[in-house]
Image: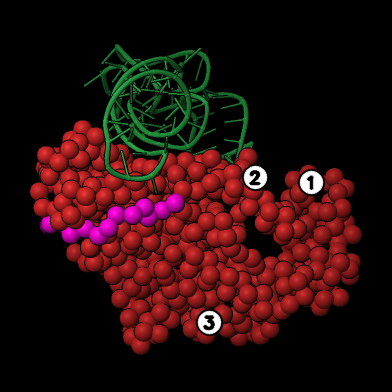
Chain colours: A red, B green
Amino acid sequence: MMKKILICSAWPYASGVPHLGNLVSSLLAGDAFFRYYRLKGHEALHVSGSDTHGTHIEYEAFKRGISPKELSSQVHEQILEILKGFEIEMFYTTTESPTHYRFVREIYRKMEANGFIFSREEERAFCENCQKFLADRFIQGTCPRCGSPNAYGNQCDDCGALLEPEELLQPRCRICGQDRISFKRTRNWYLDLPRLEPALKEFVAARSFSENVRRFTESLLAAGLKPRAVTRDLKWGIPAPFAGAEGKVLYVWAEAALGYVSATIEYFERKSEPEGWKDFWLTEEAKHIYTQGKDNIPFHTIFFPAQLLASGEGYHLPDQISATEYLNWIGGAQFSKTRGIGIYGDDALELLPGAYWRFYLLYARPEKKDVDFSWEELEKAVNGILIDNISNFVNRVIALGNRLYDGQVEARPEERVLAEIRRTKEQVEQEIEGGLLAPALRRIAELALFGNHYFQEERPWEGSKPEALASGLQLVKALVILLEPFVPSFSQQAYRLLNLDRPALADILKVEPFRLGQAKPLLQKIKVEELKARYEELVRRAR
RNA sequence: GGCGGGAUAGCUCAAUUUGGCUAGAGCGCGCGGCUCAUGACCGUGAGGUUCAGGGUUCGACUCCCUGUCCCGCCA
């Protein structure tokens, strides 16, 4: 049964290039899901884009002496390169796209017309020098609790106290550094989340979210929701479409997620099928999968669906949230570009081709708990499992087929081998469709183990057991097809050796004669000490 | 402080949903074998107080309680 599957990966914030953790939790995982469902014969589409608005990008651009637009465009281009290098095939746009602007403004007008938007006046910190309102984190001052001079408007990092901006002593603007801070009245528009609570509860109850996602969301709902501001007194963003809100923009989190819809619309516009998006969004039939880090869960199970519900347009709500824990740097440290901690997408590709990263990252994807990056684990996964175990098995079997049967091998795999392949396929399907990639990949690696074991036992190189070779080839075929979502370029190379043309998942069990190409190693082992040294060099150069 | 997640072999992970053979794999280590394959592969051995303590049970890694440590989120 063919189904429309929409994969929505969390939008990278375009203040800087994404790091390995960002990639594995969203875009890379999204690509693996996308490729899996396509392999299975579904009509799959994977969308995301650069989240380019907001204070942080304004600030980052200011620091670099360029405009927010220049910064986000630069980063967007870098991300496009990273996608290519990591073999991520998707529709990737930006929140600056005209389609997104139009869609966001329209849907907010609908939410307002349906009575889910209200406004109220409040006091906000204002920098007289910059002539702009300041987000909490952009006011710095002395902590009233511990006296640290570096407390922020929302929190003092030194003593941990949670603060309100007006509590700071000697407040100053982080952007210009001056202390001409005043508190001015301003009007903001709010999404009325309390009024959407019943509909949200119904939505969550009707979905079979994974245990952690469901529990987390339910506890937020049980605690009661508060209205959430959707406007900001900023220049860099999408102009708020409400009467009286001239000069204000929509809050980034209030518009970026809507990009899942607008990106789908844009994708079909470019294909000249302007109605095509409706088959994904205005139907119950489709399945929507969201990939992201755990910090994004409430936005995708509450804030975003609330917006869709408030529009009253009947948009399809999220079906599955595949949220990861964090990939941390060595020793559990948080990635930080400014402090030179961690590997970022662009540097990663200077060290190794994307396929190697894909295998390691998806194999170690932090689906259950935080995982620390480790060079040793990278080496183990790539050299030990992908190459020694899997790729060598592929080469082993095909080379033997070349040598003994001149590449022409009859189709007569043994039933017990087919049964093992079938079991693996079913387990892999179950894991991936349940939102998990790492266990699926581990299961595939086990099939290679089975293959090596089987070969050793049957000794087909002695020439008397052609069915063993046929079985080996069937295993190879299964392996490379199952691996396509994880390491696509590897599988595609192997397809050529096996004379397969765009195989489907179901072909794993199809029995047919083999006509083999000339075997050759498809991957080269990595030298981790050398990589480490080159990485140190990259970090040094960046400083 | 509240909520959630985690803790299993030196390392990375299974098994916990639904309590049930002797807690399993891979890597690493010791020994042996194979030699078709990228020094790859296979067998075998050593290696466990399943974080700690208590409880329920014929039986607990699994369920309940208390505590410790790690990671988040929130206040």
Residue type at the position of mark 2: Ala
Which one is nearer the viewer's eye here, A348 or A234?
A348
Q: Residues within 10 Å of mark 3 (few under 14, many from 20)?
A: some
Q: Residues within 10 Å of mark 1 (few under 14, many from 20)?
A: few
- Secondary structure category for the residue under label 3: loop
Q: Which residues are magenta?
A: A509-524
Q: Which residue is mark 3?
A: A97
Asked whether the viewer can see residue A206, the reply is: no
- Secondary structure category for the residue under label 2: loop
- Secondary structure category for the residue under label 1: loop
Please tell me which of labels 1 and 2 falls first in the chain.
Answer: 1
Chain of the residue under label 3: A
Which one is nearer the viewer's eye here, B5 or A48?
A48
Chain of the residue under label 1: A
Mark 3 vs mark 2: in front:
2
Q: Which mark is residue A158?
A: 1
Seen in the picture, residue A284 relative to A485 is either above or below; the reply is below
Distance from disc 3 to disc 2, alpha carbons, whole Å, reads: 35 Å
Kindly check if marks 1 and 2 are in contact, taking CB atoms under 8 A apart as contact.
Answer: no
Residue type at the position of mark 3: Ser
Q: Is residue A6 left or right of residue A453?
A: right
Which one is nearer the viewer's eye here, A197 or A534?
A534
Q: Position of residue A237 (x, y in %)?
A: 63, 78
Q: Which residue is mark 2?
A: A333
Q: Residues within 10 Å of mark 2 (few under 14, many from 20)?
A: few
